[in-house]
Amino acid sequence: MDDSATAQTAAPAETLKPRSELRDTISFLVKLVILVIIVRSFVFAPFSIPSGSMLPRLLVGDYLFITKWNYGYSKHSLPWSLPLIPGRVFAKDPARGDVVVFKAPPDARTDWIKRVIGVPGDTVQMRDGQLILNGQAIPKQRVADFVLPMTPNADCDAPTIEMAADGTPVCRIARYRETLPGGKSYDVLDAGQSEGDNTEIFTVPAGHVFLMGDNRDNSSDSRFEPVMVDGENKRGIRFVPMENIQGKAVVSFWSTDGSASWVLPWTWFSAARFERIGEGF
């Protein structure tokens, strides 16, 4: 056999460079980040509940998924509200009773969650704690009190805290069942008289929605004008532009009462509220 021919044949194999594990890892991570951004922007995203404004349906420490396609897409669908989508595309208005996550006016920087009460053209008013929609009182039926054990994640005011029969503190608030036109029903809380119990008549303008929290006496929502304190909205949102809506709440996937410690893994399970996992809207 010709030794020179053998050497020529083997030469290309000797010049091949080994694959870089670091380069492959970086490539994988970049692709993964792009996939996560696409899914979070256009399919679904997680959201955690930071306050008690949506009691009794949502507790502090609940985690839920929102779907992103229900109402179309805007720049607020994207991370950091990147201005890559003009206006709204594939737009569809939410229905009364939907629970939505949105960028809160006036600065559209913070994610809030509330229930849609009024759509464009509706008139909305609160009169002695009674919701009036388009001039008609919304049916409000008294049901069993809402009772929540006091844990680190409980969001309750002092007047609603009492001692249970076993001596443990609980939050007890009067609960009612509201039913909107079209049949959508949900529970709301009424802890007594508050500023939001009586309002003017609001007419929802085109391209906007009127949103309220189910915890009617402990919710900053469309009943109030925004009040900015140190760059943060501490009061209300008034009418919310449709393009600010990011998605629709669909299902709870985790819930914790706040008693867990990161350094004590077994408490992750003892603090879990498993009965709340899988609840829909």
Image (cartoon, rainbow, N blue to C red):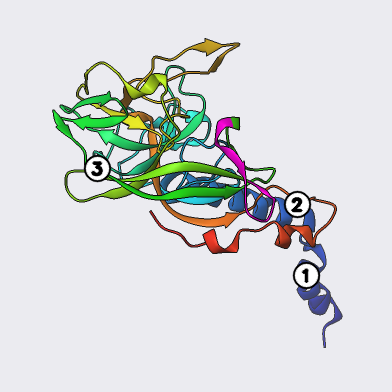
Q: Which residues are magenta?
A: 159-169
- Marks 1 and 3, how far apart at CA: 65 Å
Residue at the spot of label 3: 95
Q: Residues within 10 Å of mark 3 (few under 14, many from 20)?
A: some
Identify the residue position indicated by label 1 in the image. 13
Q: Nearer the viewer, residue 79 or 159?
A: 159
- N-terminal of the two: label 1 or label 3? 1
Q: Position of residue 225 (x, y in %)?
A: 39, 14
Residue for badge 2 = 260
Is residue 28 visible to us here?
yes
Q: Please name which of the two marks, 2 or 1, marks the residue nearer to the observer.
A: 2
Considering depth in this image, is 237 or 134 the residue closer to the camera?
134
Left/right placement of residue 44 relative to residue 210 reads right
Is 140 positioned to the left or the right of 163 in the image?
left
- Seen at 79% across and 72% down, the residue is 8
From the top left corner, tell me how far across and down residue 164 is, in percent: 62, 50
